[in-house]
Amino acid sequence: MATIVALCVSFSSCSKDDNSLVGTTWVWEDEEYDETVTIKFTTKTAGTLTEEWGSGADVTSFTYKFNDPTVSITLSDDGITVSISGTVRGSTMTLRAFGEESVFTKQ
């Protein structure tokens, strides 16, 4: 759940295409805690966030709005709704939430 909170971010992109995130996959890894978070933008307004750790995994669906260069993500998990914002620059996406920053790499 802490990772999901870290993902509540807005992002920017260099592309002017309002569909530029569709079909993209972004990964953040924390080797210290053996944790990986994968964000997939599957449609123009929705995607999935997969959090993997040790031998477990959790998949959460989310909705988003992309207004180049900003993306706003909204997801719910365990009855808690979280809004996220961040910035996309080339092959990196920086997400900020609750004072934390996570840098994702485009796959």
Image: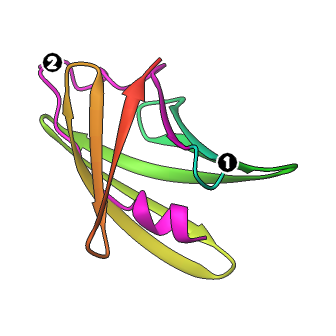
Residue type, mark 2 in image? Ser
The residue that disc 2 covers is: 15
Q: Disc number at residue 83? A: none
Q: Disc 2 to disc 1, how far (Cα)?
A: 33 Å
Which of disc 1 and disc 2 is earlier in sequence?
2
Specify whether residue 45 is in view.
yes
Magenta run includes residue 56? no
Looking at the rendering, the stretch of residues picked out in magenta corresponds to 1-30
Q: Disc number at residue 34? A: 1
Disc 1 is placed on an element classified as loop
The quadrant in which residue 76 appears is: bottom right
**Residue depicted at x 39% and y 37%:** 104
Numbered marks: total: 2
Residue 71 in the image: x percent, y percent?
25, 46
**Residue depicted at x 54% and y 71%:** 2
Residue 73 in the image: x percent, y percent?
38, 55
Disc 2 is placed on an element classified as loop
* 40 lies above or below 95: above
Q: Magenta residues: mostly which secondary structure? A: loop
Colour style of the rendered protein structure: rainbow
